[in-house]
Image (spheres, helix red, strand yellow):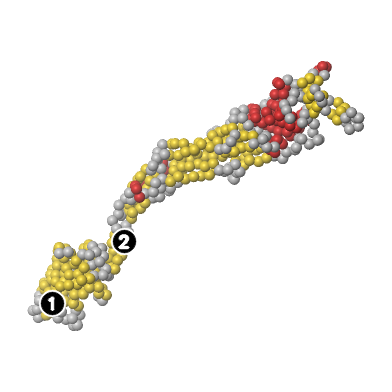
Amino acid sequence: MAVRRPLKVNGTNGLIEMSAADVQTLINYAVFKYGQSPAVTLAVAATGNLGNISDTRLSAGAASIDSATTTTTTVTASNLTGTHSTNRRAHGTFGGYDPRINSSTPAGIYTHQLWADNGSVGTVDMSFQINATGTYTIDFAWYSYSLTAPLTVKLNGTQIYYQTLTSYNVTVSAPQATFNASSGDTITILTSFPSSGWSGHYTYIRGGAGTNTVTTIAPQSYPSEATTQEPQVVTTQFNKVLQSFVSTTDPTSATFLNPCYYDPITGITEMTAADMVDTFISPAIDILTSSTVNQNTAGTYFVSTDSAEIDCTPQGIVFQDTRADTSLYSAAGIPESLDQPQTVQNYYLHLRNSTITNPEPLSIRPVRLYYNGSDPNGVQEIPQFGTYSMNTLFLYYMQYYTINVPGYRIRYNFNDSGNNRGSMTDTILNGTGNYQQYLASVDDYRSQEFPNGADSISQTHSLNIHRN
C-alpha cells in the first residue's frame, strides 16, 4: 500500500501522472461526496447513545422548623408530709378526704376536703414533691355559716398563691389559678379555718383539664445556621445525542474498478484498495475530522450556543446550563421549594451543510482498466472515469471506511479523544448558603439556606470528532 499518482489523459499526448494538485482535487472530491451523504449521523433523541453529560446547580437546603411542641406527662407526687387537723366529716353527708396525693376520685395530684365543726379550727400544713415540669392548677372551695377561710400555696418555700373565701351557708369557689413548676419541686398547702357549725375546706392541685397530667410546651427559637441544611447540588444528566450509521456497500469487491497508475515493473496497474485509502480516503477523513467547521467539513456535526447557524441544519438542544434562580427564594416563603432553576444557556447540535459547488474534476479524471473477458490479453481499453462511476467509487469508499474499517471510522463522543467540535460550560453558584429566618406565627420559627454566590465554572463538556 502506498500513495499513488493516478494516470490521466493528457489531450493527444496519451497518459501522464497526476500532479500533487490533481491528487488534492480528488481528495477534495471525496470530502465533497461525504458531505452530500454523511455516513455517520447524529440526532437529538429522547435517549441517546453517546453517554451522559451532567449539569449541576445549587438548590436550597431543607427548611428547619421549630414549632410549638407539647408533651403530656402523668404526674406522680411523692413524699407527702406534714400535719392537719382531724377531719370532722370524713364519712359524712358532704364527704371528706384527708390530705392525699395521686387520687383518682376525685382526680387530683393533691386533694383534701377537710371539715371542722362547732367552733373547732381546721388546719393543714402539708408538703409533697412532683416529678414533672409543667403548668399546674389550684382549685379552692369553702363552705361555712358566714365565715372566712384562707388558702396559701408555696413553691419551694415561696408563696405563689393566697386567697380567702367567705361562705353564707353555700359552697363558694375561687377562680382557678395556675402556676408553673418543675420536676423535683416541693409544693406546700397551708390553711387555718374556723367553724360555727359545719365548715368545709376544699383544695385540689391538678394538671390540665382537671387531670393528673401536665402539658409542657418546649421553648421555640430559630433553628441555627449550623443545624439548618446547607444548599445541595442537583445534578441533571443529558443523554440526548444518538449516533447512527447508514447502510454501506463494500467498494473493495471485484465489481468495482479503481484508478490505475504507472509502475516501472508492472506497467499500468490498478490501484489496490489500500492504495485508494492512502492516496484519497485517509487524507479526506483527516479534513472531515478537523476541529475547524467550514465548507470542507460538510456532513459533520458541531455544538454552539446559537439555535441557528449559517449553512447548517439545527438538530436541537443537547445540553442546558442551569443555575438556581435566587430571585425566586424569599424568607417569607419558607419552606421554599428546594429546586428553583433557571436556564442560563442552551447548547444546540448542528449539521454542517454542503455548500461547495460540485468539484468533480472533469478535466483531470483518472483512468481505469477496462477488462474484456473475450480478449486474450484481458485489457481492451483504458477509459476515463465517467460521472456516475466517479460518484459511486468515491462515495462508497468514504461511507464504507468511515463506518466499518478501524483506523478510518468517524466517531463522535463527549469528553473523550478527538478534535473539539464545541464546548458546553456547566456553571454553578459558589456560595455557602444564604441563611434566612421567618416567624410564620406564634411559636413557629423557621429557617432555610438558599443558594447564593457568584457564577463559577463547575465543569466543561466537549463534543469531539475523531477517526477511530
Residue picked out by circle 1: 85
User: Could you give the CA–CA distance between mark 1 and mark 2, rounded to whole angstroms?
Assistant: 40 Å
At x 43% / y 36%, what residue is drawn? 455
Position of the N terminus, as image quadrant, is: top right
Residue 318 percent location from the top left of the image: 56, 39
On screen, residue 168 versus residue 409, left or right, reads: left
Q: Amino acid at mark 2?
A: Thr
Residue 173 percent location from the top left of the image: 18, 71
At x 37% / y 43%, what residue is drawn? 434
Q: Counting other residues with Cα less than 10 Å from the Cα at mark 2, is it few (<14), some (14-19), or many (20 or more)?
A: few
Q: How many marks?
A: 2
Residue 260 percent location from the top left of the image: 79, 26
The answer to whether residue 208 is visible is no
- Examine the image and state in which quarter residue 196 appears: bottom left
> Would you place residue 11 above or below residue 246 in this image?
above
Q: Amino acid at mark 1?
A: Ser
On screen, residue 454 versus residue 295, left or right, reads: left
Q: Counting other residues with Cα less than 10 Å from the Cα at mark 1, is it few (<14), some (14-19), or many (20 or more)?
A: some
At x 14% / y 75%, what residue is drawn? 84
On screen, residue 21 versus residue 202, left or right, reads: right
Residue 70 is tagged as 2
- Examine the image and state in which quarter residue 347 appears: top right
Label 2 residue SS: strand
Position of the C terminus, as image quadrant, is: top right
On screen, residue 340 versus residue 98, left or right, reads: right
> Would you place residue 187 above or below residue 317 in this image?
below
At x 27% / y 75%, what residue is drawn? 104
